[in-house]
Amino acid sequence: MTTLYRLSKWLHKWVGLLLLVFVVWMSASGILLNHPDAISNVSVPRWLVPPQYRIQNWNRGALRTAAFSKIDPQTGFIGGTQGVWRIGDGGRTFQRMAEAFPESYIDRQTYSLLLYEANPPQLFARTRGGLFVCDINSAAWQRAPLKQKVQI
């Protein structure tokens, strides 16, 4: 009886510790995956990624939205997971609009675009990182001043 008691006590302790490590790991990773803002600026070095790792479906949602000029139909803007791009020459040339745009992959995900063709023309982009406005002539982004935080 004493041997069985000692064995069950030893098993209970070590299996419990292993399960504790597993539960803590799963809890921490779940919290981080549900709150990507906490890890949006963290980048994993390439040497830490195993060589057999292949990115699949990397461009899912690469193009989500588009806005075309009514004044100049040869000019347009597209947005998606990689940020915002300017289309010129009716789709023959593309230019990335990244000046002062969020650098983080998560924050630059663009969900919608609005082209406001007044003087000066402006492009509004709703991203995961907030609302940004760009003066088309200078191609520099600024965070749109909002009185309250907007949930996306």
Image: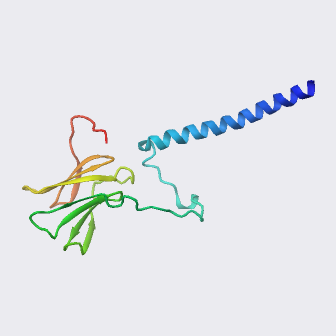
40 over 52 or under it: above or below: above
Which quarter of the rendered picture does the C terminus lie within?
A: top left
How far across and down, in percent of the image, does residue 49 sit? Answer: 57, 59
Q: Residue at coordinates 82% horizontally, 28% vertically from top-left?
A: 9
Residue 90 or residue 82, whichever sits in front: 90
* Residue 52: percent from left, percent from top: 60, 65
User: What x and y, as percent, mark residue 142?
Assistant: 23, 50
The percent coordinates of residue 77 (x first, y second) are 22, 62
Q: In the displayed structure, does residue 106 sit left or right of residue 69?
A: right
Residue situated furthest left in the rendering? 119
106 is higher (above) or lower (below) than 13: below
Q: Considering only vertical position in the picture, is 94 above or below 120? A: below
| Identity of the residue drawn at 35% across and 49% down | 107
User: Is 58 positioned to the left or the right of 28 in the image?
Assistant: left
Number of numbered discs present? Answer: 0
Q: Locate the N terminus by quadrant.
A: top right
- Quarter of the rendering containing residue 2: top right
Query: What's the colour scheme?
Result: rainbow
Is residue 1 found left or right of 131 in the rendered image?
A: right
Which residue is rendered at x = 87% and y = 25% of the image? 5
Quadrant in the rendering for residue 67: bottom left
Is 49 displayed left or right of 105 in the figure?
A: right
The structure residue drawn at horizontal position 38% and vertical position 52%, both measured from the top left corner, is 104
